[in-house]
Image (spheres, rainbow, N blue to C red):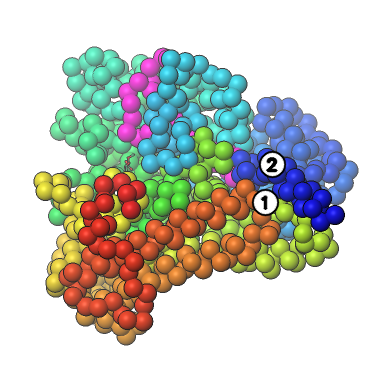
Amino acid sequence: MKIVFNILFLFMVIAGLAQEDGHQLWLRDKKARPVTVVCSKNSPTLAIAKQELQNGWQGEPNASVILTLKKDKALKDDGFRLSKNEVIAETEKGVLYGVYELLRRQQTGEAITGEAENPSYQIRILNHWDNPNGSVERGYAGNSIFWCNGPDSLTVTEKDKKFWQEYARANASIGINASVLNNVNASPKIITPEYLSRVKSIADILRPYGIQIYLSVNFSSPSILGKLKTSDPLDKDVIKWWNDKVKEIYSYVPDFGGFLVKASSEGQPGPQDFGRTHADGANLLADALKPYGGIVMWRAFVYSPNDKDRAKQAYNEFMPLDGQFRDNVIIQVKNGPVDFQPREPFSPLFGAMKQTSVMPELQVTMEYLGHDKYLVFLSTMWEEVLQSDTYRQGEGSTVARCTDGSIYPQKYTAMAGVANVGLDTNWCGHQFNQANWYAFGRLAWNVNLKSEQIADEWLKLTFYGAQSSKLGEANYDADWSANFLTPVKQMMLDSREAAVNFMTPLGLHHIMSANGHYGPGPWWAPKGMRADWTPPYYHKAGSDGIGFDRTKTGSDAVSQYHEPLASQLNDINTCPEKYLLWFHHLAWDYKVKSGRNLWDELCYRYDEGVNQVRSFQKVWDKAGVYVDSTRFLEVQRKLRIQCVNAVLWKDACLLYFQQFSEMPIPFELERPVNNLDVMMHNDRGDGRSH
Ligand code: GCV
């Protein structure tokens, strides 16, 4: 009998596998109750809204739900109002967002209040760093969902369409309304007729879900594609070339959103090649797009090899141009002044450019945070940045309020996230990376949401009921909440701080392995290499101490912040400890708040990070009973890898820095298990050799 039961159980587990592989994201199939949906209008978007209600209704059985399109003074853009049986909006997209919210609240048990729900940002956009050959720069979830290699690479298949539709649905369900289909390191061919046909097919599938298409363009396209002698933004043939090209693009995609541009940055061509400014370059494209309502997202990610402090350059280059950009240009600024590090202070450009629209760029893909291997919930990091006070217009001038139109009257407001999506079955490589896609959408819709709520929603939508067999239905909810939801949510909320601890505590940054940006590489500085691409440029470890002096007597990056923040960061006694070595170079025996000296504190932080990941393993193993086996085992395997890598980070950084501190690792802490010479010898710069 026992054998029969075991076989049956095994069969149930295997049968369950096919359904719970993560492909359905937070939109898993539900047993819907019957519902009648009433709407006086018809359209592809409204048809989706109706279908979603019918497929997912969890309210009163046989209820009647009304979708109402009408004017409402409290609503803006695609906002909506909900009641138990009605969704009110001014636009069809608003109705669709309202339907997803209603279904989400039914599932999570959140109250349905009837308040107006308006988006924080008008444009909530994913940036795909996808190349025309199907590879994805900094992508860790398989190849591109939009592009592929090979002779038939531009033929649109049914499989393509299915994927694009699923992608569109997932985005719409969290309020994302725009996508840039290709890498900012842009191939010029993306705007040739062959590629534009495929762009049109993608746009046609995404449109009913309310998603507008944008493209990254190469600034030299007029010379490369148009064979012009120059791509100088002030040249009249160049102006005409872009005007014609834009007209052509709109003939394929009449509601095309516009361009994203990386120019005069990391070797990409740009206006500076012709002695022109970023404003000249952006305005050229903005003028071409203007008649069609298109916009330009112009990136501020710039730095040059000669600068003494890379963190200062974007501010230095863009501030003098404030007020010179057309009103359909938005400057897209990475959250921190260097580059998506595990922790950075906010970029000083936020709030500083008062006459120019500015939008935050966040990185959803985990370039510097463990690729598809680590469990790191990024929402807490984004919350930290978005709620940072810039003081630009007095206290409370948070990054969020400086960019969402609350403080400055921007014509357009937007938030971008560098996507983490690929062809992997679970879309994101790691099951928990789905939570970052989800969090990006939710924060772009409501910038004041708390990470705790976002994690709570995501866990309920993604895991509730995944394994019902062993617990007994009557106690399931209480059990699940106490033994799965609560501990796993806490793990998510702690996960980013854990990563900071075992990678870059106390304000350290950019000490990862070169190129791959995965494991540790604080030593990496080959002869002749650009200094600002090497970790020693950032940590400045020596016998006198460690850290980058950005105080007034150092690089003076602190002065790019507004008072009282500038003084607070400048003063070692008031600088928050999390940014200590970002702004200060300190002696190894400097006393930190805990009473320890700096070296000991560093050791403790690294040790703490490793212990945190070990504790995540315990949390997950214990929660396993509530999770289907495929997703459980996948996450379990990855936590093991993360743990091994965390130890490696700790050993590499402590043994390397110890050469300068010449102090012992406190004897009560675990001893290193990796040797420095071996780690350095094995380092190929991609972080994989360890
Ligand atoms: C798309 C970092 C990344 C690059 C990326 C660049 C950018 O340098 O390592 O892969 O290029 O940022 O944001 O443009």
The amino acid type found where label 1 is placed reads Asp
Q: Which mark is residue 99?
A: none
Residue 171 in the magenta stretch? The answer is yes
Q: x, y (%) of residue 533?
A: 21, 49
Which amino acid is tagged 2?
Gln
According to the picture, the residue beneath numbered tag 1 turns out to be: 628
Badge 2 is on which residue?
19
Query: 309 or 322, which is in the foreground?
Result: 309
x and y percent of residue 273 in the render? 17, 31
Contact? badges 1 and 2 (CB < 8 Å):
yes
Give the farthest residue toward the right: 62
Q: Is residue 299 above or below residue 378?
A: above
Percent position (x, y) of residue 166?
61, 34
Asked which secondary structure carries label 2, the reply is helix
Rendering quarter of residue 506:
bottom left
Residue that extends furthest to the bottom in the rendered view of this protein: 595
